[in-house]
Amino acid sequence: MKSDAYKNTDIGKIPLEWKVKRLGDEDISKIRSGGTPSRSKPEYFLGNIPWVKSGELEDGQIFDTEEKITLEALNNSAASIFPKGTLLMAMYGATVGKTGILAIDAATNQAVCAIVPRNESFFSNFLQYLLIQYRPQLLNARYGGAQPNISQTVVKNLFVSLPPFDEQRTIAAILSKIQQAIEVQEKIIERTKELKKTLMAKLFTEGLHVEELKETDIGQMPRGWEVVTIGSLTVDGIMNGAFVKNPLWGNGTRFLNVVDTYRSEQVNVDLLMRLEVSDGFKRNYALKNKDVLFVRSSLKEKGVGQPCFVDGLVEPVIYDCHLMKLSPKLEMVDPLYLVLYCLSEHGKKRLIANSNKTTMTTINQKGLSDFTLPLAPLAEQKEIVHIAERLNAKLLVHQYKLTKWQGLFNSMLHQLMTGQIRTNHTEIPFDA
């Protein structure tokens, strides 16, 4: 039975039997980085020795690598082979601070810090979770320039709390179990999104009912469908949003910005920021239920034409100048059907093709108005929308579960790593 007595240390209060050590202490670990063989010799990268790059570290295990080097490359570079069980950390680049545990013997490049445990000083899986908890501290200690990085000195001088080895293993097992539940939800969400993407592509080409297909300028579609322009589906044309100079944020009118269009197909108005605007702005740029919005300009090409719609409005909402809005003829088109087509792979590619590309990618009112799409009979549109809504509901359920598991992981990570919760009385309902 573990003691519940605690002691004060330089890194805070921890259980009495835990130790505080520098990660670089000789009795704890051996820390060093790898190297990159000369790229001027392509034959160096035709070998069978796994070679890990920093971009391959994603807080998991490393079972294989994108590139493999030869023994000659190893002997003619700063690279060396680290044993299975070595903990790796990315010191440079986009994945700075991310970790990985070698499930194989492998070499690394110089952007990877290898932490090799000495004897049973620490359990690599435990230390990986500990470094995940310490990541904000490590990133605050990084130094940068063109490419932010963490130095080996920072890693070596990091003070860590080390429980007895058996307790380390138990803590790692608990966190691993929660992580597995997170991964289950992530996979369900990924598969559901892929199913929706595939299904929408099929429905916008073949429809829901067995019907002869016809060839059109925009591809195959059921014979009973029409090719129409977006402009023909609008009540009063297409309008650009409001340019608010020197906005005062915090109070006032809800404001729909570009970033809000990416959250979901239907905008969650409760998440919109507020700003102070005149009554004239509220009159001229007010949205109505069922209005559809499109991103007018984007720094990223794939962002242009991003669609969404609003509904259930209970207070005034205005929209940004980088957006365009239209009020659809509801007797002709369901707003979500329009959004779904423009989000489909085929629709998105065609919207981008209709845009202008300079410093920013833009689509103007005429370009959007002239954009053509396959229009199913309204009853069939509703059926397609219902299918999408069922998949959206499933996504919401699993996104909620994912958020709960992520919250539990973060809470348990902190409490287990500081000894606030001891492993002798930890019970978790592992139901993903």
Image (spheres, rainbow, N blue to C red):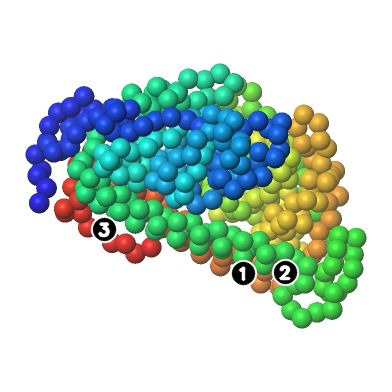
SS class of the residue under badge 1? helix
Disc 3 designates what residue? 428
Label 2 vs 1, first from the N-terminus: 2
Q: Nearer the viewer, residue 42 or 422?
A: 42
* Left or right: 289 in relation to 54: right
- Above or below for 235 versus 300: below
**Are there few (<14), some (14-19), or many (20+) residues within 10 Å of tag 2?**
some
> Separation of disc 2 and disc 1 at Cα?
10 Å
Mark 2 and mark 1 in contact? Answer it, CB < 8 Å.
Answer: yes
> Separation of disc 3 and disc 1 at Cα?
36 Å
Q: Residue at x 51, y 39 (%)?
A: 107
* Left or right: 299 in relation to 123: right
> Separation of disc 3 and disc 2 at Cα?
43 Å
Q: Point out which mark residue 203 bears.
A: 2
- Above or below for 370 versus 88: below
Disc 1 designates what residue? 387
